[in-house]
Amino acid sequence: MSVQRDKEKPADSAAGSSEEIRLPVDEHIEEEVSASGKRVRARGVYLLPNLITTGALFSGFYAIVAGMNSHFEAAAIAIFVAMVLDGLDGRVARLTDTQSAFGVQYDSLSDMVSFGLAPALVAFSWALKTLGKFGWAIAFLYAACAALRLARFNTQVGTVDKGVFIGLASPTAAAIVASMVWAGHEVEVGPILAVIAALVTAAAGLLMVSNFRYTSFKRLDFKGRVPFVMMLAVILVFSLVTIDPAGVLLTLAILYTLSGPLLWLWGRFRPTAGGATKSDRANAKDRQ
């Protein structure tokens, strides 16, 4: 009898474990509580920041649909709306102390749609499709680089300086492609314009997975005081954006994109106190 009872115990424990596995998905979700830094079991997810993330996801999805229907201006604007919402969800989560591991993963998946798939498909529908297989290969290259960029960013959280981005951020890459489509949506797409669009899209994708360092602007103190001329500069930028939104946004995105390679060149070939550049020191070390 004792042997029979011993055999029954594993069956009971197995049944109990299977019941735990069959619990509803949202019944027990481990959330990262920012206040104490401890992992606690909590029912459901935070509404406000995830609602904003859903808005960004919807904007990216709308951009894809609009691009497929040749509404390229609306598609480009939707990508920029997704950028604004993507910048808000994290800040709202920090202000309301509603940060969570679920929110981080949901935001990353939303970014893949809004800044990975949407720009690639909109650019393909606008100009890249005229290049045939080369066009959809460029569109896929951009989407794949965006996925790699987001995956690398997620694995580097907490280990990389928050003041910089390693590689071009996916929203900025999306801004380059979206503003390009926005600026040229009324222009008839010919072979030359299609090749230029392919080069810009490929460059934006490859820069996302590069090792160039870009300023993240996360250390800007918006609560501090700034010179009065700074407010005049902000007003001037807003005025220029209202005059020609596509052109100004494209110019700003290109300038920021070029800042990474230019800073790298400056740091590599800038003479130091001894008169030697970083490149010279590296060559001397190799000769040794």
Image (tube, rainbow, N blue to C red):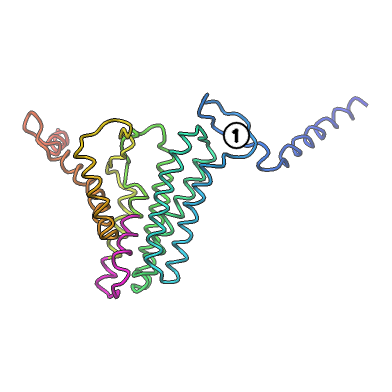
Q: Does residue 8 belong to the magenta stretch? A: no
Task: For label 1, count other residues whose C-alpha is less than 10 Å away and answer few (under 14), some (14-19) or many (20+).
Answer: some
- Give the percent coordinates (x, y) of residue 121: 41, 64
> In front here: 20 or 184?
184
Q: Element under label 1?
A: strand
Q: What residue is rendered at 41% in x and 69% in y? A: 71
Horizontal arrangement in the rendering, residue 226 relative to residue 102 (left or right): left
Question: In the rendered image, which residue does mark 1 sit on?
Answer: 30
The image shows residue 232, relative to residue 201, as above or below, that is above
Q: Check disc 1 and give the amino acid type.
A: Glu
> In front here: 265 or 251?
251
Q: Does residue 182 belong to the magenta stretch? A: yes
| Magenta residue span | 175-196
Q: How many marks?
A: 1
Which of the 4 image quadrants contains residue 16?
Answer: top right
- Give the percent coordinates (x, y) of residue 63: 44, 61
- Give the percent coordinates (x, y) of residue 153: 40, 42
Q: What residue is rendered at 19% in x and 39% in y? A: 229
Magenta-colored segment: predominant secondary structure? helix
